[in-house]
Image: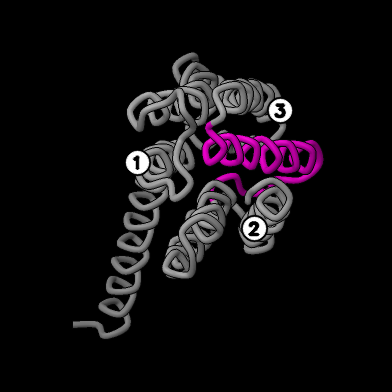
Amino acid sequence: MNPHTDHQRVGTRRVNNDIFVAKALSTLLTPFGFAAVASVVFSWFSPIGLGPMMSPLSSAAIGVLTLCVFPFLPVAYSVATGRSDLDVSDFKKRGPLYLLGLIGYVVGAAVFGALNNKVMFVVALAYFCVGLVTFLITLSWKISAHTAGIAGPTTAFLFVFGIWALPLYALSMLMVWCRVRLQAHTLAQAVAGLLVAIVVTSFVYLVFYP
């Protein structure tokens, strides 16, 4: 047996395993899915209520529709028509997809604001602001929407539910590893998405959340 060959095989197997895990986690923790989870959690466990006109079910349903489903539809259409992959790897194609997602966030914020559901209004507003900043950056640089899509809601959890949410930032760091390991982003692009989401979401909550 050739020890050098065995070492290469082990190394190749480890790389393949890493890529498999990174791809699985990147798919499982997609920003769209995380938005749906955030909508349900904020709607069912809001410490400030949902206003006089909304139930947890209606709040979560509108949140999932405007923060998850609506922004995902243009991406799904782009994939179905062969115009891009699920990650929209060509960042030059992301602009129109971002714009449609931003419309969903605006609609969500408008509905929640009109119905006095402050906890979900601020969530939707934070999504819009983070989406707008990442969209503007995307016009010239491929910032990671995946890391932003985890770090933003995690920061919202921190402001609403307190320090127990801090361990959730581990998911953001894990997503940084996933995106870099898959070569979908450089380390700078992945970390930038995380930092932009934290800073912008923190600003929104400091201004608009009680």
Q: Nearer the viewer, mark 1 or mark 2?
A: 1
- How far, Cα to Cα, is label 1 from label 2? 23 Å
Say how many tags the image has: 3
Q: How is the image coloured?
A: one colour
Q: Amino acid at mark 2?
A: Ile
The residue singled out by tag 3 in the image is 95
Q: Are marks 1 and 2 in contact (CB under 8 Å)?
A: no
Q: Nearer the viewer, residue 45 or 52?
A: 52
Give the quarter of the figure containing the N terminus.
bottom left
- As shown in the figure, which amino acid type bears the numbered disc 1? Trp
The mark nearer the N terminus, 1 or 2, is 1
The reply, left or right, for residue 14 in relation to residue 94 is left
Is residue 128 or residue 109 the one in the foreground? 109
For residue 28, side relative to residue 136 (left or right) = left
Q: Is residue 193 above or below residue 126?
A: below
Measured Cα–Cα span from mark 3 to mark 1:
33 Å
Where 131 sits versus 107, above or below?
Answer: below
Pinpoint residue 154: horizontal percent, then vertical percent. Answer: 50, 56
User: Image quarter for residue 6?
Assistant: bottom left
Tell me the chief SS of the magenta region. Answer: helix
Q: Is residue 158 visible?
A: yes
Quick one: 27 or 122, which is closer to the camera?
A: 122
Instruction: Give yes or no for residue 121 being in the magenta stretch.
Output: yes
Q: Which label was assigned to residue 44?
A: 1
Mark 3 or mark 1: whose residue is earlier in sequence = 1
Which residue bears the numbered disc 2?
Answer: 198
